[in-house]
Amino acid sequence: MKPVGKPGRTGELMPVEVALARLLALAEAAPIRDTETLPLAACEGRVLAQDLVSTLDLPPWPNSAMDGYALHLADWTGEPLPVSQRIFAGQAPEALARGTCARIFTGAPVPAGADCVEMQENAQVQADGRVVFTQSLRVQQNIRPQGQETTVGEVVLAAGTRLGPIEQGLAASLGCATLEVIRRVHVAVLSTGDELIEPGQPLGPGQIYNSNRVLLCSWLTRLGCEVLDAGILPDDLPTTRQRLVELGDVDLILSTGGVSVGEADFLGIALREEGELALWKLAIKPGKPLTCGHYRGVPVIGLPGNPASTLVTFALLARPYLLRRQGVQAVEPLTFQVPAGFVWAKPGNRREYLRGRLEQGRAVIYKNQSSGVLRSAAWAEGLVEVREGSTLAQGDEVGFIPLSEVLG
Ligand code: AMP
Ligand code: MG
């Protein structure tokens, strides 16, 4: 296990890029290499373990892009051509008899000897059944050539590609019924805090409902992880120790809460007794405190407990880490530059990820950006990135990370 790095000096904040680079380096030092072979339909959200190499030309044979007529262009002199065969998709045509054309439909194989397809809208069928073409014709027009999309031996999807509906469809088009994928990442999710109770129970004095647990468990499931829901850890040391031992063998311990500076940090104490844990103060808002380390060799990431902080740090740091453990290269979400539809007068020393939306192409932000307000994210369509040290006037460019980018 690589050292996780020392916390910055007091007052010194770690830039988001540095935190991400460190987490990705840790992920690369602990790659998950075990694989399993799954039916194609079960591969959604999983990561391809081997390059997918085409064993086919796609399309396997030249086929028609139109409903119309196939002909040998040199046979077209202006004299009507008789129709010698009809070719539907799924049929194997005979070679085209010289001096004739073939009625052909979209997706049907172009017969040997034909080098042109004219769409039916530009063809006139005479009373005697022969066909004339009303427009000028070009060789290969409306023919999708063999191997247009893929040829045998080409890498169509590289190892490390995340699989979704499009990749599943592509693999199906190549005839793959199964794919070899990286096994699921096993993640133990821990919520911490004496104030937490689970929904469905009456709320006692001083208590709040645990929202991070379900938020993280469903998000992790979407990411293809296997979630070990380890429930709520009370703020006491012996129980915390005991519950950690019970976690057993997982790939990551992901906790929320208990990392605010000055708090009695029982999880941190228990983790450090059997491992290593660094507290990073990130130049990010919401979400300043983040812990990172290992417990008995199992990697640990501790996210801050405020729900909006949990969301932002998971999206920007934990999610890329989990993907990189599976060998995914493109782990950072797409960020679009959009004009701000709001004013930002006070430059901060942390990068802000405001919960916002696009309205008429401009980023607008939720009225309450407190890190405790998860409703801001439910209202939002994305995270609006305001760089540290910057102010914004209406129309200035800001980064916009669609939540749909990071939620899956
Ligand atoms: P902490 O980091 O434990 O000091 O928590 C920071 C804030 O987040 C406190 O207001 C906690 O009550 C709140 N919090 C911590 N964990 C959760 C959770 N699982 N669900 C909802 N709120 C939480
Ligand atoms: Mg707490």
Image: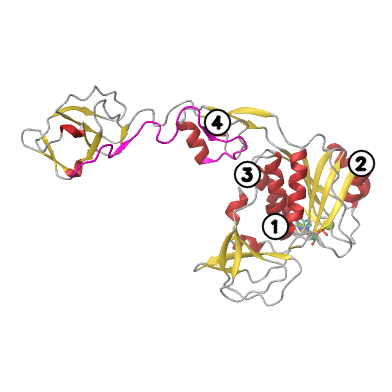
Mark 1 residue element: helix
Bounds of the magenta segment: 136-165
Q: Looking at the image, which residue is at 82% across and 35% down?
A: 248
- How many other residues sit within 10 Å of disc 2, few (<14), some (14-19) or many (≥20)? some
Dot 4 or dot 2: first in sequence order is: 4
Image location of residue 305, percent across then percent down = 78, 57
Dot 3 or dot 1: first in sequence order is: 3
Q: Which mark is residue 52?
A: 4
Q: CA distance from mark 4 to mark 3?
A: 23 Å
- How many other residues sit within 10 Å of disc 1, few (<14), some (14-19) or many (≥20)? many
Left or right of residue 335, residue 134 in this image? left
Q: Please, is residue 61 above or below residue 230 in the view?
A: above
Q: CA distance from mark 4 to mark 2?
A: 42 Å
Disc 4 + disc 3, Cβ < 8 Å: no
Mark 2 residue element: loop
- Which residue corresponds to mark 2? 274
Asked where in the image residue 8 lies, by quadrant, the reply is: bottom right
Closer to the observer: label 4 or label 3?
Answer: 4
Identified by mark 1, the residue type is Val
Q: Quick check: is the Cβ at mark 2 less than 8 Å away from ligand 2?
A: no
- How many other residues sit within 10 Å of disc 4, few (<14), some (14-19) or many (≥20)? many
Dot 3 or dot 2: first in sequence order is: 3
Q: Which mark is residue 222?
A: 3
- Which residue corresponds to mark 1? 312
Q: CA distance from mark 2 to mark 1?
A: 28 Å
Identified by mark 2, the residue type is Glu
